[in-house]
Image (cartoon, rainbow, N blue to C red):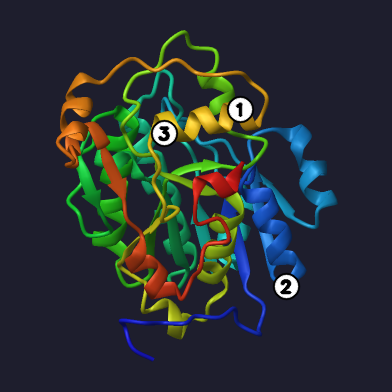
Amino acid sequence: MTNNNINLQPVQDANTIMLCGCGWLGQPLASRLIQLSHRVYGTTTRAEQVGVLQAQGIQPVEFVLDKADVGNTVYSATLLHALTDSDVLMVNIPPGRRHLHATPFIAGIKQLIQHAIVRNPKIKIVFISTTSVFGDMTGDVDEDTQVEPVTASGKAHAELEQWCLHEYGQQACVVRLAGLIDAQRHPVTALVKRPTLTNGAQRVNLVHKKDVIAALMTILTMPTADFTYIAGKTMHLCAPDHPTRQDYYQAAALHKGLGSLSFSIDLDANAHSNANSINSNANGKIVQAQKTQQLLGFEYQYPSPYDML
C-alpha cells in the first residue's frame, strides 16, 4: 500500500461511529453504515427527532451547540458516553448563514473535539468543511491550494480546518464539500425566483449527496492502519465536470419544468470568448478533486452535474 494510490475498502469488523449532525446528509449516511453492521450515534438538536432516529436504528443523542455562547453548551452524560464509545467522530455542524457569531461557533467546535479526545484519545476525527474557504478565487483550486475565505462561514471553516490538522493531524482529516445536492434539493428551485442572474460564465462546483455518502462510507469505516494514510490531509468532494452556470441552470430549469432563467450579459466574458480563450475571472473557481479520488480509490456515480437532474 502506497501513499500515492490507496484503494481503501470498508473493514470487516464493525466500527462505532458518531455523526455529530444527523440530518439531511447524516441520516442516509447512518442508514448505509447500519446496513453494514456498524453502530451509529447521531446527534439531533430537537427532542421530537429522537424517535425518528431510533426508528432508523440510530442511537440518538440530543446535543445543541450554542453558537452564541459556548459556555451555554451542555454536555450530557449520554453525549459523553457516545464520545467515549465511538471509534470515529464526524463533525458536520453548519455555522448558520444568518447572524453567525463566528468566535463562539469556532470555540464550540473546538470544545466538542477536545471533549472527544479527552474521553477517547484514539478517536478518529473527520471534520466536514466547505469549498467556500476559497472565497472569490479564480481558476483551478485543489486540495493543496492556499485558502482565501471571504464570508464569515468560510473564515470559520478555514480556521477550524487549520486547527484540527495542526492539533490532531495524526488522527484527524478534513473533507471539503462542494455544493451538495440531489434531485429533490437543487439550487435551481431558488434561482428561478430571481428576475435576473449574474455570472453566467462561471463554472459550477457541485456534488451529489449519494457520492458524498459513498466517499464518507470509505473514510468512516476504514481501519486505523488505513486511516493513517489520510490523517492530516484535506480532501475534496466535487464532481469532475464543471459546466457554466448559464448552461447548467437553464438546462436544470427546463428539465424540472420551471421555465427559463434570465442571465445578465457578461461583457468581459464575451470579449474573451470571442478571442477563443479562457477568462479565469469570468469562469470563477473550479474545484478539483482528483487527488482525493486517487487517495480513496473513489469513482463518482454522478461525474457531471447534468447526471444529478
Query: Is residue 80 at all visible to an observer of this figure?
Result: no
Residue count near mark 2 (Cα–Cα under 10 Å), binned few <14, some 14–19, many ≥20: some
x then y, percent, for residue 58: 75, 55
Q: Nearer the viewer, mark 1 or mark 2?
A: 1
Which tag, 2 or 3, sits closer to the chain's start?
2
Which tag, 1 or 2, sits closer to the chain's start?
2
Real-space CA distance between mark 2 and mark 3, rounded to the nearest whole angstrom: 36 Å
Query: Is residue 184 at all visible to an observer of this figure?
Result: yes
Q: Nearer the viewer, mark 1 or mark 3?
A: 1
In what quadrant of the picture does the N terminus appear? bottom left
Name which residue type carries label 1: Leu
In what quadrant of the picture does the C terminus appear? top right
Placement of 117 over or under 42, stated as above or below: below
Real-space CA distance between mark 1 and mark 3, rounded to the nearest whole angstrom: 46 Å
Q: Which circle marks residue 70 in the picture?
A: 3
| Callout 1 secondary element | helix
Q: Which circle marks residue 36 in the picture?
A: 2
x then y, percent, for residue 63: 60, 41
Q: Residue furthest top?
A: 195
| Callout 3 secondary element | helix
**Residue at 45% over, 60% down:** 126
**Residue at 41% over, 40% down:** 108
Q: Which residue is mark 1?
A: 254
Name which residue type carries label 2: Leu
